[in-house]
Amino acid sequence: MDLHILDHRLRVTSISKTGLVHFTHPLIKLIFLRNRSRCKFLSLTETPENYTVVLDEEGFKELQPSEHLQVEGSTWLTLNVVSNGNASSSSQAVGVTKIAKSVIAPLAEQNVSVFMLSTYQTDFILVREKDLSVVIHTLQEEFNIYREVGGESVPIHQQDTQNGLQKNGKDVVKATVHPVLIPENQFCVMSLDPDTLPAIATTLIDVLFYSNSLKEEPHPSEDIQCVKFFSFSLIDGYISLVMDTEAQRRFPADLLFTSSSGELWRMVRIGGQPLGFDECGIVAQISQPLADSDISAYYISTFSFDHALVPEEDIVTVTDMLLKQRKDPAC
Amino acid sequence: MDLHILDHRLRVTSISKTGLVHFTHPLIKLIFLRNRSRCKFLSLTETPENYTVVLDEEGFKELQPSEHLQVEGSTWLTLNVVSNGNASSSSQAVGVTKIAKSVIAPLAEQNVSVFMLSTYQTDFILVREKDLSVVIHTLQEEFNIYREVGGESVPIHQQDTQNGLQKNGKDVVKATVHPVLIPENQFCVMSLDPDTLPAIATTLIDVLFYSNSLKEEPHPSEDIQCVKFFSFSLIDGYISLVMDTEAQRRFPADLLFTSSSGELWRMVRIGGQPLGFDECGIVAQISQPLADSDISAYYISTFSFDHALVPEEDIVTVTDMLLKQRKDPAC
């Protein structure tokens, strides 16, 4: 299989809930007015805590520094696995499950933090630029590695990297087993022809920028079984949307499409306290057992928590598996 | 004829060019998300100096105080002339020309400041709330006057107003004759079915909120023959747009409509220095001679200047007339 290190240099940021109004102007530009910006990578995810915005340097320079904007200090690079058809796989699973053993687990073993962004089209594995030589060294046995430079894919040869290698830390640290939350919303992973984006502009603007301004009745605390989660990404011209069925009903049914109609997903939110960016192995901890059971999963990291989406029909299996893991972390 | 005093209580504000980014969130809400606000009167006009925003109290409370926001101190009420078909008029003219002699001139003679907002649908005459008794007294000979209260039109009888009357100042002040500028752009006055507003949302957002961010080549000063002017209003559910033909080309041709296709207008901008809000008779000075010649005119006041739009085929006549007026203000 091929692994591409994409051309994007990304920043991972967070905008506070109350601060979003101050970023409406640049974000609407980045989402809807492609002629006005050279940004090629934008991902915006609303969670109950904040808005996670991952974007390339062209996009990042549109965001004015502000008390409402938190910026993770690193530059992140994007890895993308391209199945070149040679590997015969018996797995029908999609998402991180396909790369759990080949990418996620080896990087965790080398103490490389990853920030995952699954989309409708593919799964992006973000790693810190400073970890790149470790990443290449770790994955070059399994993959043909290419670095995209100005639209060209340049192969990276083994000898290019061995000198610069330094392992991240000495020992493999066993990851903490984090609490999980399994809300009751059902999610869809959808896409949209970029040419029809203007047709859903007002609805998307409403959902993204104004959904908190409605004075909704607060749920009694025992009823908070649904979790706010809405993700939009526009990456290299491809649009991906992750939303729950309640949000989906607000969009015209004929414009958004999903890979098989009616496919619904349930969420596992990972983390009791915000996870930070330095702990390694969080994605591996979830994706490995899913891979063992050949269960598809999308995985979306945000500034505070990680989120796995698994098929609705598998949620009981996954819940049991996660409960066992939490009772006996050695499993 | 009937004169209606509408239910709106309006504020006249100005947002600086550089400050618009801070008001993108509330303005997009007011323009596109009608379910999120109870604002029923919104007019937004871009000129080279600033953005003039006229809106009712429901809309005004969406605008946070800011160094970028100037607010005229008064509450303004809206007058609207309703032709009830009884008056036989030989005039084919539209716009302020029709009300120049019956409304504009008498109010100027009583030293009442007016702020005019012509739209595709009708002409709104804004007067300060404190001037209302003078306005009623001045216009009740010519009009049946109704005050709209909660959707009902309540007739105002002559005896209701005579006690409260106080004339604005003692003498009629002859208005200053202001310099005029006649830019070369051709303008259209258009409308749009409110249900199709979402279809032009991204274009309208681009034109309204991002047209200054393009690094356009500055014109050499001798070439500034076109003046930036774009006006959008959403009043009681009716949309009106005034834009030059260059902006018009950016919109889909099948959604915007004008009363007769290809009808183009030229602009007369009134004022060398910002006009302020206290001088009376400015509208009268322009609209009276137009009425004498039965030339149609839209008239749009903004925070700094006034703007009359006259049919392209009449611009030579109007220019001559204005030149004469400026050489010999007694005309």
Image (spheres, coloured by chain):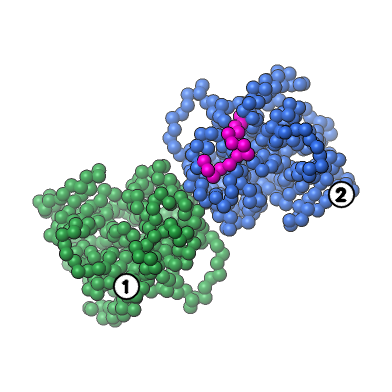
Chain colours: A green, B blue
Name the residue rendered at 59%, 53% in the picture. Answer: B62
**With A244 as the anchor, is B135 left or right in this view?**
right
Q: Amino acid at mark 1?
A: His
Neighbourhood count class around disc 1 (C-alpha, 10 Å): few under 14, some 14–19, many 20 upward: some
In the picture, the quarter occupied by the N terminus of chain A is bottom left
The span picked out in magenta is: B253-266
Q: Position of residue B6 (x, y in %)?
A: 73, 49
Name the residue rendered at 86%, 47% in the picture. Answer: B161
Relative to A21, residue A280 above or below: below
Chain of the residue under label 2: B
Q: Is residue A206 visible?
A: yes
- Does residue B265 show up magenta in the picture? yes
Name the residue rendered at 43%, 57% in the picture. Answer: A255
- Does residue A43 show up magenta in the picture? no
Q: Position of residue B308 (x, y in %)?
A: 65, 32
Q: CA distance from mark 1 to mark 2?
A: 76 Å
Q: Nearer the viewer, residue B36 or B11?
A: B36
Q: Secondary structure at mark 1?
A: loop
User: Which residue is the site of mark 1?
Assistant: A178
Res A216 → quadrant? bottom right
Q: Position of residue B221 (x, y in %)?
A: 50, 23
Q: Residue A109 — which label?
A: none
Q: Nearer the viewer, residue A117 or B169?
A: A117
Neighbourhood count class around disc 2 (C-alpha, 10 Å): few under 14, some 14–19, many 20 upward: few
User: Which residue is the site of mark 2?
Assistant: B157
